[in-house]
Image (spheres, rainbow, N blue to C red):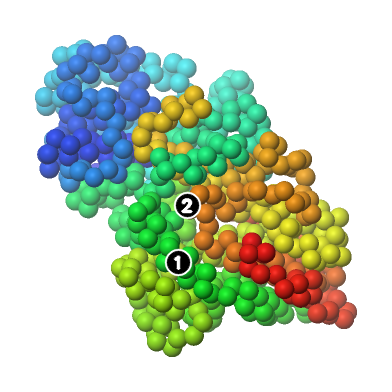
Amino acid sequence: MVADLWNTFPPRMRGVLLDSLALAGAEGLPAAEPDHLLAAVLGDQQTAAYGMLHWAGNLEAIQSTAGPDSGRSPMTGQNGKASVFSDGSMRVLHSASDIARSRGATYVSTEHLLLALAADDSPVGKCLNAAGFTPAVGRRALKAWQRKGLIERRIAMGMEPGSRFRLGTLRRHLFRRASRLPGLAWHMVVNKSLLHPKFVTSPYSFYRRLRHTHPIRRDPIFPAWVMLRHADVQAVLRDPRFVRNPFSPYAFPAESRLQLAAPAIPNEFNTMMLFVDPPLHTRIRLVFMKAFGSTPLQALRPVVRRQAEALLAGADTAGRLNVVADYASPLPTLVICDLMGLPAEDAPQLKKWSDDVIGSLAFNPSMEQMVSAEQSIADFRDYLTVRLPGVSAKGGENLICALLKNGGRELEEVHLVANCMLLLMAGHETTTGLIANGVLALLRHPRQLQHLREHPEAMPTAVEEILRFESPVQWTGRLASENINFHGHTIRRGELLLLSLGGANRDPAVFKDPDHFDVTRQENKHLAFGHGIHFCLGAMLARLEGHVALDVLLQRYAGLNLAQRRVRWVKGMTMHSPVELRLRVERRAAPTESGAGLDNNNKTANDVK
């Protein structure tokens, strides 16, 4: 018996299992039976199992005998699911695991599930055999499906990341397989996929080529729709039919999660406004918007400047600075602690918890990341539960007091704590990327750097250009809540859309000469902070921190030179920023009153935004 089934299930397999629970629930049954597993397979035309049935010629016969729900694809995560899998279904899943291992696979996917159903001594197994799909036919169908021109789907079904699969492993396995393909197949399958390594290190040439040839497309390997044009990304982000919740593939009831040995999804994820949809999103966001609106962010400018200068003190004597570790990473955490009225000495621990949680939100979190995130969320929750009342009792002008004055007391405690946690997490990752990307872009474009030294009042437009040119967040995701026709493409209910913010921000239909970095660019309707109802709530704060951090750095040092040959980028597709950025710095002989062009122009918060 396999005690740890969940780790061997890739995302599409989990979607099929979740659909089977929904189908059983729609019939008023407490458990999903093997016939619900078959009906769910028939409802997803992108699975290996569906392709095998189609090749074998048994599809129509099986659909006609599998019941009225065959071919139906419920939206994953909908209400009314059965709570468990029946003993018969669990027997089939364990059999599928045995079949996968016997074939040398490290995953259990729909082809193995279909072979297990065909070999099972149950009504659904007899149904498949009666329709001509015997285990022997199934094995031949699988071989034929692998040989037929569906290489990319085969790789996708076999290599979709389960919770213990890492992108490095994916790529190694993928490239070993792809290296044996003819040159044309390699180009068609791998060179156009998000799993290509250069989508992390240097994505913009890929965006440019794919935007021209396939602006709306299915990724040949990753199970998602990909959109790269500014207009398409913007349209999806404001369309309420595309929903935000990214956890629906994992929204199994607690009982079935226990059966599959799945890690628990912390309740906080399902109450953070970043991950929920209206009406809950509207209620939570309104409270936090009022709090931000009543908090004088411009009063934070001297606080940000003081923190920035303190962080740079060590570099003055050493003549060296790691921009990420010593400056861009700790600064946002210190600022958000000050804004929320939390002790500055807690900032390192808060950042550590934030890093753990953010790591688990990747497209392919490992089991270790999930376990670490679960513990960090529990510690984070305990910390805030104790701290929030104390900060409120002291009073003062901070965000927590503003929240409680502007409707925060009406929120449930889990909503208030989870979204304060979100502010502490989201406040540092993107701003770190903004500062580090900005420094690197300016070093690579010395004329733009010199212009900012001579015209510090241009810093607001420079920050907008950095956000456009090197967006810290490159991708965001949505799920289709119904079947949607989008520019001639049918996007089925429950399918994932990956929206390229970085690609949209280089769209020549919107930005003149988009690959040119210009700190004086005026027309700059970038999507770095998203769009629509989920537009980043902390955008003004991030801009303020970026303005001050870059201004202090440029005005403090007469010389800034890159002290490393190669820039390593953060792993994964979502975030785009250097892992480290080591500089040689030369302090000005006579420090000036830095930032005069910014501090004395009486800009309001709206002007900065």
What residue would you read off at disc 1? 288
Which residue is rendered at x = 30% and y = 44% of the image?
Answer: 77
Q: Earlier in the sequence, mark 1 or mark 2?
A: 1
Q: Position of residue 83 (x, y in %)?
A: 17, 46
- Residue positioned 49% across, 24% down in the render: 488
37 vs 129, nearest the viewer: 37
Residue at image position (52%, 39%) is 235
Is any part of residue 157 visible from this angle?
no
Judged left or right of residue 412, residue 575 is right
Numbered mark located on residue 59 in the image: none
Q: Is residue 413 above or below residue 440?
A: below
236 or 304, which is in the foreground?
236
Three-letter code, disc 2: Ile
Q: Helix or strand or loop: what does disc 1 sit on? A: helix
- Furthest toward the bottom, the residue is 394
In this rendering, the answer to whether 360 lies above or below 550 is: above
Indicate the secondary structure of the residue bearing disc 2.
helix
Location of residue 82 (image quadrant) = top left
Q: Distance between the residues labelled 1 and 2?
A: 13 Å
Query: Position of 561 compared to 149: left or right?
Result: right
